[in-house]
Image: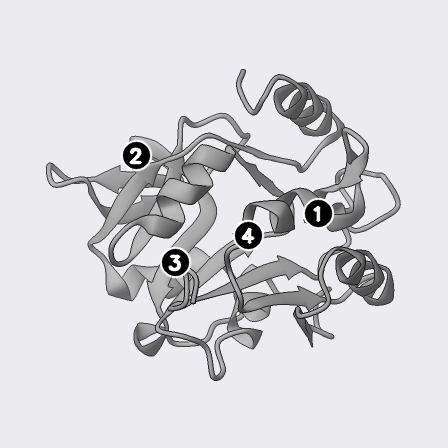
Amino acid sequence: MNSYEDITIVISCAGKGIRLGKGCTKALIEVNGKPLIIHQLEQLDKCDDIRIVVGYQAEKVIETAKKYRDDITFLYNNEYETTGTAASFSKGLQDSKEYVVALDGDLLVNPDDMEKFLNHEGECVGGCIPTTDNPVLMTINENGKITEFSREHGELEWTGLAKLKAASLTPGTHHVYMMIEPLMPIDVLEIRTKEIDTENDYNNAVKWVNNGYHD
């Protein structure tokens, strides 16, 4: 048994990544010589239940991921053009383990922070210093728990990374944070991440990874 035997990982890779303009889904963009999805899988080597939700360029994503490990479960979000990440995440909930981790296919996480996150006892969500345009922000109470998601105010930016009890979740179709709202308050861990939405994001992420996942 490994140290993550009670965790199911769900990576949402269904979207087109139109804003980035690379002509491929963001899971396949090259970051320092390897696809983004491989960077993610390398950090999840100790996890034995990984589910990747595919849509746009599904076969290419499957082929790329299978070259790294052959025990991944692939699920399809065929409505990826009209639904959000919650729809993809919800595909991975059936018959999952006690905890389910939501991970967006465009997110790079500092490896030390990912390990800290996976090892956290109980439920938690990942937050970072606000950097993106129009972020979803999190209000955090004195006990370090999130009490509200907001576009207007909050201490940290929601990263899309969450570890949640599967039995508590109700499937959704829009945003994962909307699935989390009924479960609050939940522990918040501040983590170092880079989300890739635009060409500028991509260039910054490449530098960041090349610098050992540090700014």
**In front: label 1 or label 2:** 1
Q: At label 2, which amino acid type do we have?
A: Gly
Quarter of the rendering occupied by the N terminus:
bottom left
Q: Residues within 10 Å of mark 2 (few under 14, many from 20)?
A: some
- Residue 144 against residue 95 in the figure, above or below: above
Which residue occupies 65% across, 65% down? Answer: 52
**Residue at mark 3 to residue at mark 1: CA–CA distance:** 21 Å
- Residue type highlighted by circle 4: Leu
**Residue that label 3 marks:** 3
Indicate the position of residue 68 as horizontal and vertical percent values: 74, 55
Nearer-N-terminus badge (4/1): 1
Q: Estimate how packed mark 3 is, as few (under 14), some (14 to 19) or many (20 or more) residues with alpha carbons within 10 Å.
A: few
Residue that numbered label 2 is attached to: 154
Taking the spot 26% from the left edge, 64% from the top edge, the residue there is 183
* Of callouts 1 and 2, the N-terminal one: 1
Residue at mark 1: 38
In the rendered image, the quadrant that contains the C terminus is top right
